Image (cartoon, rainbow, N blue to C red):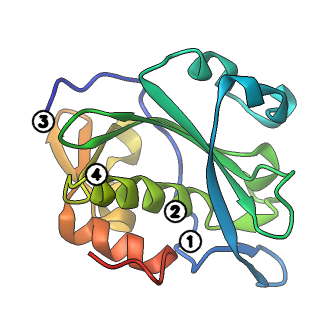
Amino acid sequence: MNNIQGIELDFEIDKLTNSIENAITGEVFDTLITQIRQIDSKQIKKSDWGFDWLNELKHSEKQVYKLTTINNMDIIHGLICLTDKGDHIFMDLIESAIFNKGKGKMYNGVAGNLVAYACKLSFEKNYKGIVSFVAKTRLISHYEQTLGAQIFADNRMFIDTKEAYILVKQYFKNFEL
């Protein structure tokens, strides 16, 4: 793998779902993940996010994607920033919208959906589903258990082909290798 650098990610996988689901009712909503470009930056309300996503959009080597429901594409449930490293996909940043965090969150499955998309993109680019990221040390075992991620070095982690395929099939039922 190429040199891995980046922010230590601290997203939590609350639940691996089939899409995203209402945390109270369990109702499932079909999702759509689309790329956001700098000209679309007005879609990102700073009050909904802890990170400066507008800064991520300024970097030409990075791609930012938004997670919405198919029925309401105006509400962004989560964002992910990815970099194509030529042999794998690197997750620079991932975040659920503020209303999808903590005990009072509205929806489960947001982070899992976004990570599965990164793996799907890796398969589509013939990188065998491999995705890497830098984890906060306290969350390494969480990522090992929930995503099947493995330690590469220190707090650098990766999701390998088998685990990536399981995640992709969880969220993208029609996906085939």
Mark 3 / mark 4, whichever is N-terminal: 3
The mark nearer the N terminus, 2 or 4, is: 2
Q: Is mark 2 on a helix, strand or loop?
A: helix
CA distance separating discs 2 and 3: 23 Å
Q: Name the residue under label 1.
A: 15
User: Within 10 angstroms of label 4, few (less than 14), some, or many (20 or more) residues?
Assistant: some
In the visual, does 114 lie left or right of 73? left
Helix, strand or loop for disc 4: loop
Which residue does the image show at 26% across and 69% down from the upper left?
163
Q: Residue at x 39, y 42 (%)?
A: 138
Nearer-the-camera pick, 120 or 4: 120
Nearest to N terminus: mark 4 or mark 1 = 1
Q: Give the residue type that dot 2 points to.
A: Gly
Which numbered tag is attached to residue 1?
Answer: 3
Tell me the residue that label 4 is attached to: 125
**Residue 71 seen in the current view:** yes
Closest to the observer: 170 or 142? Answer: 170
